[in-house]
Amino acid sequence: MDSDSSPSAAPPAAAEAGRYTYSPRLRWQPEVEEYFAAAYGRDHFARISEALAHPSYYSCIRVNTLKSSTDAVMHKLMDLICENELSAVINGLEVVELNGGEQQHERGSLVHKCPYAGLENVLFVQGSGPHVLHYGSQPDQAVKEVVVSRKCAESVLRGAQVYVPGVLACSSHVEKGDKVAVSVAIEQPVKEGGWAVGITRGTVLQGLQSDAHYEERKGLYIGQGTAAMSRSAIFRVPHGIAVEMTERVYKLPSFNDVLEGEIFLQNLPSVVTACVLDPQSGERILDMCAAPGGKTTAIAILMRDKGEVVALDRSHNKVMDILKLASEMDLSCIKAYKLDALKSVRKTDEARNLGMADNHSEAVEIPTEDPCHATVDGRSTSVDEDNSTTTVVHSVDDNLNAKRYISKAELRKNLRRMKNGPGRNNCSGGRVEKSKGFYPNSFDRVLLDAPCSALGLRPRLFAGEETLESLKNHAKYQRRMFDQAVKLVRPGGVIVYSTCTINPGENEALVRYALDTYKYLSLVSQFPKVGGPGIIGSCELFNKTYTEEWLREDEAELVQRFDPSSSVDTIGFFIAKFNVGEKDE
């Protein structure tokens, strides 16, 4: 029976005003929650946890000052707003309804300069929220709904549309053009231990209290929109927009295809990180974990595109993303390589054996093979993709007795492995260069924006996947990367370490490790300074079998910790800057 006419349907929106709201509560593993409460104080951590479940109220734009000026970009954005070309992007932000009230904005006030010294290339574009939305148009009918995954909901809260892969469940009889409420299904604890969403994709919602996650979705409605396709199509096609959002709890700017190459949407702490590194023209800089390239391009711009910025990532497609972004911004000093940062130091003996003479040639650049040919035993061989027969390959000396037989299926497999796919951007024909590492002491400055638990990213609707053990493993991984960074930077150089997590074990504890392990490293002050001080003291973990040491009072003022609950309203982030003295190796 159609849910719209069912007598046992759940009460409409008017009768369940508390249901159709956005009031998330971020869930943590109990042991992790206690750990953070000990580090921050229980009340402070509660404020951080609340802030993480909501997006920032503004978007941060970094201007490419090699192609334009901050003032010029600011005027262009305001002109686009006035011409309504950006109206769909910013969702009519001239009138902002905040906490049930209304506040009138002049169009120009939506775009303003960053108020912090040293960040003159940064603009803020104002968003708004949380908005009070009114779900449902017929007082006696159940609201038609779409339930999306947590990852999808986090993107929608940042301004995205609802795409097909993110839809988990949908009301029956939803047709293209129908108005639908969008809620999110968040992982719940299960009896066997752990967490699970517990919704099979394609589930039908009947508008009943027996619907999947009916109670759990109370207070987790993120907006409403127009179905871009019918229910049957949503679960039949592999991609495309499922719901075009028309009303959102948070209205935040999106800048797809807006002033491409002149601006880059980037979190404020990430912009600060590149500035703290303070790269100089003509230097050789290493960005160890560079994707998607935001900090890499920021560094290159600060150097006026003079010098060399080496960007590493172990993913083929992510390296291509870096190259594509560098091309969009007309930056020529960036060299991107496919390389695991844990293998970024090349052994000196190995480099000598290859006859490498100078510090700038130790990166072995290996373009991927031509997709139509392979070189086997020094001889070029064509591959017919439609032919799976066996081919005979001769050795270099053309000795007919020195033959070996290789199936063309094996050849094709090897070629696919070498080519590693064209990548989603088709940058440079899908080819990237590989590196086997770099000499010690071969970089003036090193940025290690380390892979981390990402517990500072927002909006975040679930944090239960992290345990104390997993947080400890993140920290071990980061220490290994930091060891590589220390070897690669020259005496007199600089290392900047950053993460996007609130976990002191990956932040202050890493600084403690660095200072205790490498006596020639010194923590130094930073500019620009936007974040607050670090955490002082220590914490006993694992039934008091392990003590995690943090910072001393004088050290805490030298780092930057960005608190999501502070008035700066950023993601959670951490930055430490080290000067490198004469090494005792």
Image: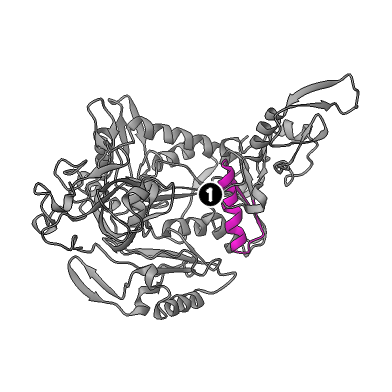
Going 55% across and 67% down the picture, which residue do you hit? Answer: 64
Give residue 107's quadrant in the image.
Answer: bottom left
In which quadrant will I find the C terminus? top right
Which range is magenta?
309-335
Q: Could you say where residue 159 lies in the image, as x and y percent from the top left? A: 36, 60
Where is 127 relative to 165, above or below? below
Camera-nearest residue between 11 and 580:
11
The answer to whether residue 571 is visible is no
Going 17% across and 67% down the picture, which residue do you hit? Answer: 100
User: Furthest-top residue in view?
Assistant: 401
Camera-nearest residue between 1 and 498:
1
556 relative position to 2: left or right: right
Query: How many numbered discs sit on the rendered protein?
Result: 1
Disc 1: CA contacts within 10 A as few (<14), some (14-19) or many (>=20): many
Camera-nearest residue between 390 and 315:
390
Give residue 435's quadrant in the image.
Answer: top right
Q: Could you say where residue 328 lies in the image, as x and y percent from the top left? A: 59, 62
367 relative position to 535: left or right: right
Going 67% across and 60% down the picture, which residue do you hit? Answer: 332
The residue type indicated by label 1 comes to Ala
Q: Could you say where residue 356 lies in the image, as x and y percent from the top left? A: 78, 39
The answer to whether residue 338 is visible is yes
100 relative position to 344: left or right: left
Magenta stretch: residue 322 in it?
A: yes
Where is 455 relative to 327, above or below? above
Magenta stretch: residue 64 in it?
A: no
Give residue 103's quadrant in the image.
Answer: bottom left
Q: Which residue is mark 1?
A: 291
Helix, strand or loop for disc 1: loop
Q: Could you say where residue 82 lies in the image, as x and y percent from the top left? A: 40, 80
